[in-house]
Amino acid sequence: MTTFALVGAGTGLGLATARRFGVAGHAVALIARNPERLEEMTAELARDEIQACGFPADVLDIESLTTALHAAETTLGPIEILQYSPVPRADFMKPVLDTSADDLDAPLSFSVKGPVTAVHAVLPGMRELGRGTLLFVNGSSAVRPNPNVAGTSIAFAAESAYASMLHDALTAENIHVAQLIVPGAIRPDSAHSSPDVLAQRLFDIHQQRDGFRHYAEPLPD
């Protein structure tokens, strides 16, 4: 059994994706800051007979994120799939003219240093397996800068560039890197962007391994 590791585990998309990969036979490593929420999610997955375990970590803390991913691999088995999809903080989303250089420290740590740390933690295990999938989930500002959320727009663009370079660099090693852009809000009643629909989409991307960038639905005009 290999492991699906979810960085940014939450009760919406995160739980749905964890369930989808768990039902497919993967152990599930849930990584987030809140230990109580991780316990609740683990218990919910256990009711579906999914082996899951929570590992508290903060993506802004490189050491804690690395430790969590290594602990997940030791506890559950080799990480075959990594999904990086933590939700940005509200204070990352100032208008561009109100955004100072210091305001970019946390968003860039969140969306660049966090992914780089996570990838470096799991890549040796994927190479040993001879396969792997790295999934990045972003909002529309990753591909269409929004001056009302400057910090996230800048940081997501940098994350997109990093993920795109990884896609090109790792293809020959049978490690697929993909990005899913979710243009609007994730809502249970959405035909294209509900948690369950997006979870299936991410599972399909993992299985089909066809291209780097995918869209949950077309970007609005």
Image (cartoon, rainbow, N blue to C red):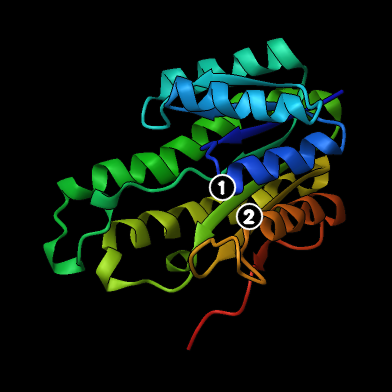
What is the x, y in percent for residue 6?
A: 61, 35
Image quarter hosting the N terminus: top right
Q: Position of residue 38 (x, y in %)?
A: 54, 25
Q: Pick the residue in front: 179 or 130.
A: 179
Quadrant in which residue 28 is drawn: top right
Q: Is residue 52 above or below residue 19?
A: above
106 with respect to 95 (left or right): right
State the residue position of label 1: 12
> Is 149 positioned to the left or the right of 47 in the image?
left
Q: Residue at image x 37%, y 25%?
A: 61
Q: Nearer the viewer, residue 157 or 201?
A: 201
Query: Residue 7, percent across and down?
Result: 55, 35
Residue holding disc 2: 195
* CB contact under 8 Å: marks 1 and 2: yes
Q: Is residue 216 above or below residue 162?
A: below
Q: Nearer the viewer, residue 41 or 71?
A: 41
Q: Residues within 10 Å of mark 2 (few under 14, many from 20)?
A: many
Drawn side of residue 59 relative to residue 118, left or right: left
Q: Amino acid at mark 1?
A: Gly
- In the figure, 59 relative to 210: above or below? above
Who's the residue at 61% across and 65% down the image? 193
Residue at 56% x, 64% y is 182
Mark 1 vs 2, N-terminal side: 1
Instruction: Look at label 2 and name its amino acid.
Output: Pro
**Label 2 SS:** helix
Q: How many marks?
A: 2
